Image (cartoon, rainbow, N blue to C red):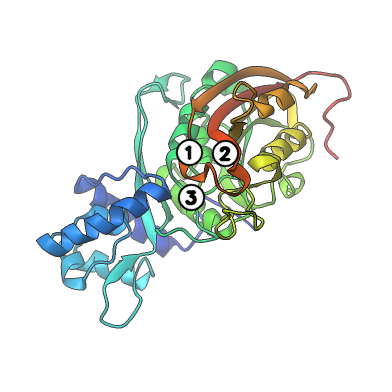
Amino acid sequence: MCENNSTTGSTARIGVFRELLAHLQAAGYTFVCPSPETQMRVVVPRSLQIAQTGRNTLEDAFGWSLEIQQEKITELLPSHLFQRLCHAGVLYQKRSSGPYKSSVRVSDLHLSRHHYQQSGNGASSPSYYNYYLHSAFPVTQDSAFFGPDTYLFLDFLALSRHYLSPRAVRTIVDVCCGPGAGAIHMARGFPRAAVIGLDLNDKALELAGINAALALPESSDVRFCRSHLFSSLPGLLPDGVEVDVIVANPPYIASKNGRRGDTGPTPMYADGGASLGLEMSMSIVREGVRFLAPGGVLLLYTGVTIVAASPGHDPFLTWILAQGQYQLLDYRVCHPDMWPEEIGNGAYVDAARIQVVGAALRKRNIKGEGARG
C-alpha cells in the first residue's frame, strides 16, 4: 500500500479536517502533546473541573480527548462543522444520546526560527507553524503516536542543514514515520526532493497522508507506504536511484515478555524489540546502509537504556563506533531521562534512566560497498 499527500483518504475527509484546523487556528487553539503518563494525570482533575464549572474548551475535545455533551460541543463548533465531523466519524458517541468524543487529537507544532523552510531560490524563509493529527487518548496497540519524542526528533532534524546541501538532496526516506511529522518536516526543508515515509501501522499511514495533504503544497512529492523497516523500499525506488538521506524515530521501549513488572504488551508505536529496545534502531543502521548513496546521511533519534551499574557506558554509541560502513558525524543526548515511569519495571529493573540520543552518520565512500540486493 502506497499513497501520496493528495490521495490518502477521501478528498471529502481531508476537507473536513482542513475546515476543523482552520476553525481551531482562528480560535487560538493550543495543545502541545504530553506523554501518556502526563495526559492520564491531567484528565481526571480536568474532568472534575469541567463538572464543577460546566465550561469546556476546544482543547478538552481535541487535545485531552475528553467526552463532551452535545450541547457543550455545539457551543464550541459551528453547526455545519459539527455535522461534518460526525458524518466523517471524527466525532462519535459510544452510546445513543451519550457524550461525543473525538477519534483524533490535534497537536501544535511550534518551530523556532532555527528550523527553516527552503524557498525556491535557495534562501531560508522564516519559521512556520502547524497542527498535526494523531490518535486519541487513551492510546491503543495500534495508535499513531505524536508526543514529546516528536518535538525532540524534529529539533534534531534541524541539524540536517549542517550536513546536507538542499540542491544535492533528491531522495529522502523516513522509516518508522508514524503520522508523518519527520517526512513533512524534511519535505519542507528540501522541497525539490522526493520523500517516502515507511511504517507498518496502517492507521499511522492514513493520518500521515492527511497531515501531508494539509501541511504541504500539492506539488510536494511525498508518499507514505506500508513497510516493515525497509522491506518495501526496493520496489519504490526507480532503477539506479539511491537514497540521499534516511531519517528515523523508531520505537525504542523494550518488548514486554512476561517479566516481573511488565503490564501487558508494548504498543506497536513503542516496541523497539530486544536489547533493551535497541533492536529496531540497530536494524535501521544495518539495513539502511544498503540503500544510502555513498556520502548519504542517516539521522537517527532513539532511546538508550543506561544501566545503574555502568552509568558511564552507552551501549548504542559503542555499537555504532564498531560499524565500519559509517562515519559518525554527531552523537548527542537530546534528553537525559525520558519515560521515567519505566525504570524499575520489567526489562528496566536494573536501569538508571533512558536517555534519548540523536546520531548523525555518513555512509563511507568505499568502492564496492553498499550495493542494494
Q: On the image, numbered disc 3 is attached to which residue?
A: 145
Q: On the image, numbered disc 1 is attached to which residue?
A: 149
**Residue pushed farthest right?**
368
Q: Depth check: give the residue in front, 77 or 317.
A: 317
In the displayed structure, 110 sits above or below 134; it is: above
Circle 2 packing at 10 Å, graded few (<14), some (14-19), many (20+), is many
Task: Give, as a three-letter code, the residue at label 1.
Answer: Asp
Where is the C terminus found, in terms of image quarters? top right
Proximity of marks 3 and 1: CB atoms separated by less than 8 Å: yes
> Left or right of 278: which side holds 18?
left
Task: Give, as a three-letter code, the residue at label 3.
Answer: Phe
Q: Which residue occupies 16% across, 71% down?
A: 71
Q: Which residue occupies 24% across, 67% down?
A: 68
**Residue 232 visible in rendering:** yes
Q: Quadrant of residue 112?
A: top left
**Residue pushed farthest left?**
53
Q: Quadrant of residue 137?
A: bottom left
**Residue 20 visible in rendering:** no
In the displayed structure, 369 sits above or below 67; it is: above
For the residue labelled by badge 3, is the local secondary structure a helix, a strand or a loop? Answer: loop
Circle 3 packing at 10 Å, graded few (<14), some (14-19), many (20+), is many
Q: On the image, numbered disc 2 is attached to which residue?
A: 249
> Left or right of 58: which side holds 172?
right
Circle 1 packing at 10 Å, graded few (<14), some (14-19), many (20+), is many
